[in-house]
Image: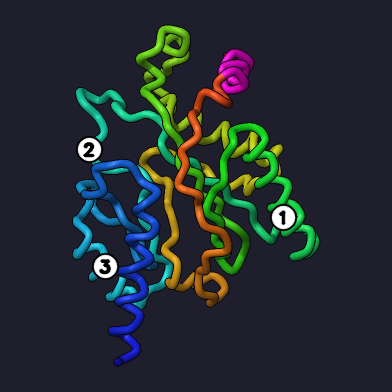
């Protein structure tokens, strides 16, 4: 089997694996490759794979949240996926990075009973934890924290969760949001280091409720006022 065909099959299978962490609808979604963002509208699965192939499978990522999630300019989606990035550049050695990963995984387990997927990107670890959420702005206790000119509450929750679960040890340049929560596809290449993205731990299929962190999240919102 030609190498390009074999890689296409591997990436296709791994795209399905990554999408198994997402909530419906699976498409259309934005993708990102080494050259550019897709247009605002997103694409279907086959089109995404073709763009990945054309980019020689470098820096292939897909947004964890679907396109078309707003109505009259208002976000209509709750937290369903948390992404944590811990980067080798922030640690003195790979051994210290690994110890930090283990601490984060223990904290996820103790704070929200989660068992996430873990990917090695070549430069660090990505931790992907699907969650069961709801539209925060629809709840009176959170509605007062809506900022018409700022981030939506789902994106704020994602940022808070990464900061809280890593005990502020995550990549400070990582700023996930519902519009740009970029998830790497295993089997593709990280052009920054030339390494292939690999799965180190599989998600257990359970979606812990976002409620486990809501009290601490609300405190963070109050402190930010």
Task: Let me know if residue 62 is in the magenta part.
Answer: no
Give how far across and how far down residue 213 sits, in percent. Answer: 58, 26
Numbered-mark total: 3
Report the front residue among 182 and 17.
Answer: 17
In the picture of the structure, the residue carrying the numbered disc 3 is: 49
**Of pointers 2 and 3, the one earlier in the residue sequence:** 3
Q: Which of marks 1 and 3 is nearer the N terminus?
A: 3
Q: At 52% across and 42% down in the image, what residue appears?
A: 175
Whether residue 169 is situated above or below residue 44 in the rendered picture = above
Question: Along the horizontal axis of the image, is 27 left or right of 176?
Answer: left
Q: Are marks 1 and 3 in contact (CB under 8 Å)?
A: no
Q: Main secondary structure of the magenta part?
A: helix
Q: Name the residue under label 2.
A: 68
Left-right relation of 152 to 217? left
Kind of element beneath mark 3: helix
List the residue tagged with mark 1: 90
Circle 1 sits in a helix, a strand or a loop, which is it? Answer: helix
| Quadrant of image for the N terminus | bottom left
> Is residue 219 inside the magenta stretch?
yes
Asked whether the beta carbons under mark 2 and mark 1 sit within 8 Å of each other, the answer is no
How is the model colour-coded? rainbow
Q: Residue 112 in the image: x percent, y percent?
A: 59, 33
Q: Residue at x 58, y 51 (%)?
A: 85
Q: Residue at x 38, y 24 (%)?
A: 134
The residue shown at (44%, 41%) is: 81
- Expressed as whole percent of the image width and height from the top left, the position of residue 104 reads 68, 45
Which is more foreground, mark 1 or mark 3?
3
Look at the numbered disc 2 and give the secondary structure of its residue. Answer: loop
**In this rendering, position of residue 168 left or right of residue 183:** right
Magenta segment: 215-224
Q: Is residue 220 above or below residue 123?
A: above
């Amino acid at each position: 089997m030609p190498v390009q065909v074999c890689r296409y099959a591997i990436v296709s299978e791994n795209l399905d694996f990554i999408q198994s962490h997402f909530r419906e609808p699976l498409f259309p979604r934005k993708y990102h490759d080494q050259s550019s963002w897709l247009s605002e509208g997103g694409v279907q699965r086959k089109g995404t794979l073709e763009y990945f192939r054309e980019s020689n499978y470098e820096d292939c990522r897909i947004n964890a949240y679907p396109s078309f999630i707003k109505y009259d300019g208002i976000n209509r989606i709750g937290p369903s996926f948390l992404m944590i990035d811990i980067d080798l550049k922030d640690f003195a050695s790979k051994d210290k990075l690994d110890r930090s990963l283990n601490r984060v995984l223990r904290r996820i387990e103790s704070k929200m009973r989660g068992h996430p997927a873990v990917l090695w990107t070549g430069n660090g670890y990505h931790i992907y934890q699907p969650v069961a959420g709801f539209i925060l702005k629809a709840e009176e206790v959170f509605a007062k924290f809506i900022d018409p000119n700022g981030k939506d509450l789902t994106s704020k929750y994602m940022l808070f969760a990464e900061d809280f679960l890593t005990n502020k040890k995550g990549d400070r340049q990582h700023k996930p949001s519902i519009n740009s929560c970029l998830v790497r596809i295993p089997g593709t290449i990280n052009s920054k280091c030339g390494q292939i993205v690999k799965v180190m731990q599989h998600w257990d299929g359970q979606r812990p409720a976002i409620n486990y962190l809501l009290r601490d999240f609300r405190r963070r919102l109050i402190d930010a006022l």
